[in-house]
Amino acid sequence: MSADRAALDLQHMTERLLACRDKPKRQYFVEQIGRIWNPGRQHSSFRPFREPTRLHHPPTDASIQAVASFASDPSHFVRHAVAKSLSSHPEAAVVSITAFMSLLGDADASVRIAAADGLCYADVSSSKADKLVPFLQDSIWSVRWGVAAALSSTTYRRNAWDAMKTSIPANAAHIDSWSWRARNFVGELQTDVDTLAKLRECVESLGRRSPFGYATKALLAMAETRG
């Protein structure tokens, strides 16, 4: 019963979204579709309050295509919502590489950051990889991380690792976000003495009671085990 209700809810939201191409509520419907795909994730950083949880239903082809069709919307709030929703579920992200590439070129940093998050799941072909490489030079380090993670399984793996190791955050509190995206580069990390030393220094600077550093400790353990 709940599965049927969730499917109807997703279909209804998809239809409503497509019907309001030039209306203010399009951002709302994009966000709500993302909430159905992944109810546990907050999809709007622009609302300070918590909305009721929706029933879950995995992405459908129709709902993915509907959300992705707003990737070039004039409003950066809508584009940000598109990037967040497509990044919220691997099944949506893996087929949304074209939308993510469009969003990576956005002038708004929050849009680029959200799009880079989804690239970790996207299926990057060799032809798409060529076009992603320039984004390794983005001014935002978290964008560089996402692009590097996406390129880790391509012929540009070396370029991706170079971007990762030169983008270690100065603030140790952000090191776990870097480590999560660097988990595909354990082979490179175990032979990179300087980067290993930087990571150990970051973890030590956090102290034992810090809530940060767990992902980095796990990454270091993997590198040392393989070594």
Image: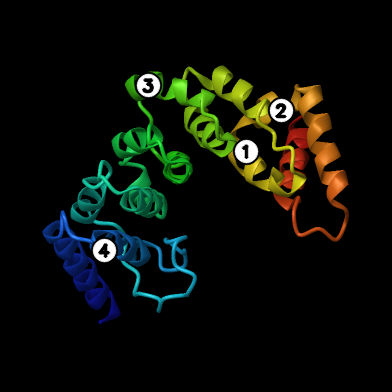
Q: Is the residue under label 3 in contact with that under label 4 (CB below 8 Å)? A: no
Name the kind of residue labelled 1 in the image: Arg
Q: Tell me: residue 110, above or below residue 55.
A: above
Q: Position of residue 128 (x, y in %)?
A: 35, 24
Residue of label 4: 29
Tell me how far mark 3 sits from mark 1, CA to CA. Answer: 23 Å
Label 3 environment density (alpha carbons within 10 Å; few <14, some 14–19, many ≥20): few
Q: Which amino acid lies under the numbered mark 3 shown in the image of this protein? A: Lys
Q: Which residue is mark 2?
A: 189
What SS does tag 3 mark? helix
Q: Which mark is residue 131?
A: 3
Q: At 30% across and 39% down in the image, what residue appears? A: 99
- Mark 4 or mark 2: which comes first in sequence? 4
The 10 Å Cα crowd at callout 2, few under 14, some 14 to 19, many 20 or more, is many
Read off the residue under disc 1. 183
Of pointers 3 and 2, the one earlier in the residue sequence:
3
Three-letter code, disc 4: Phe
